[in-house]
Amino acid sequence: MRVEQLGDGRPRVAVVAAIHGDEPCGVRAMERLLEDPPAVDRPVKFVVANERALDRGVRYVDEDLNRAFPGDPDADTHEGRLAAELVAEIRDCTVLSLHSTRSYAEPFALVDRVGDLARSVCPFLSVSVLVETGEQSHGRLIASPDVLEVECGLQGSDRAADNGVELIRGFLRATDVVGEDPAVTPRSTTDEVVVYRLGPPVPKAAADEYEVFAANFEEVAAGEAFAAADDRPVVAEESFYPVLLSADGYEDVFGYRAERVGVLDG
């Protein structure tokens, strides 16, 4: 794990990248920002989490780090020990965690529960969607206090790294690490951030090939075929909004069902 800091004193704000080693956009965005660092009014730390997986270009070494929290210093796995180390590193910090997906090109935010953190930070982020993970947060960094995740865009794309820079700048402005930033335009009160609540995952049957027909955050009607395993259609038993739905983003699930619950207030 690599940690860099801007400003003097003990940081209460942190940016985390490379929870997954095959999602380099956060590290690229972080390094671009640090090449020409902004003047800061309060200290902030930048953490590259799973360096070992990042160097190998794999999602994880022994187990998915974003299922291993809060971790254990004496765990048998690299990620189990790393999770405990990272939790200690970001304790008492307001945290932005950068990710990317194989399912959706536009950035969006995720929190364990919608509260003051989402209401204060999201207006400064270039997102129009917020996902409340709730019961699906177990084992993930987002279950820790004061953590907001962002999906920057498609995995491995230059655009995801570009989005990452913009998202970090917005987060630093929202947390008063930096003052006025011409690169950050707070969201207008007329620009809605739509909130979805994550439900159970959509399992994958064993197959050689998978397809997805539905678009993320667009409603799937009951009875509609939204995916296929080989040539077998997967039909919705009831209507839902897909989140992180893709053919190959996860090994054993297509993604998640969600419900639309309204717009972010405040």
Image (spheres, grey):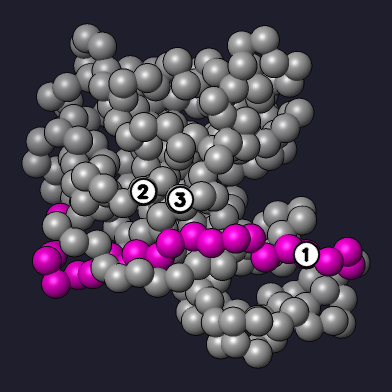
Q: Residue 246, image x and y in percent?
A: 65, 66
Q: Place residue 231 in its image quadrant.
A: bottom right
> Which quarter of the rendered picture does the N terminus lie within?
top right
Please name the residue that numbered disc 3 is placed on.
134
Q: Residue 130, image x and y in percent?
A: 36, 59
Q: Residue at x 30, y 31 (%)?
A: 94
User: Mark 3 Cα within 10 Å, few/some/many (few <14, many 20+)?
Assistant: some
Mark 2 and 3 residues: CB-CB less than 8 Å, in contact? yes
Residue type at mark 1: give it.
Lys
Magenta residues span 186-207
Q: Place residue 177 in its image quadrant.
A: top left
Q: Residue at x 67, y 10 (%)?
A: 74
> CA–CA distance between discs 1 and 2?
27 Å
Q: Earlier in the sequence, mark 2 or mark 3?
A: 2
SS state under label 1: loop
Q: Residue 32, image x and y in percent?
A: 39, 36
Task: Examine the structure image and report whether residue 76 is included in the region drawn in magenta.
Answer: no
Residue 204's mark? 1
Is residue 34 visible to us here?
no
Q: Nearer the viewer, residue 186 or 68?
A: 68
Q: Residue 57, image x and y in percent?
A: 70, 37
Q: What is the count of numbered marks?
A: 3
Task: Say whether residue 16 is left or right of residue 209.
Answer: left
> Which quarter of the rendered picture does the C terminus lie within?
bottom left
> CA–CA distance between discs 1 and 3?
22 Å
Residue type at mark 2: give it.
Arg
Q: Residue at x 65, y 90 (%)?
A: 223
> CA–CA distance between discs 2 and 3?
6 Å
Please name the residue that numbered disc 2 is placed on.
113
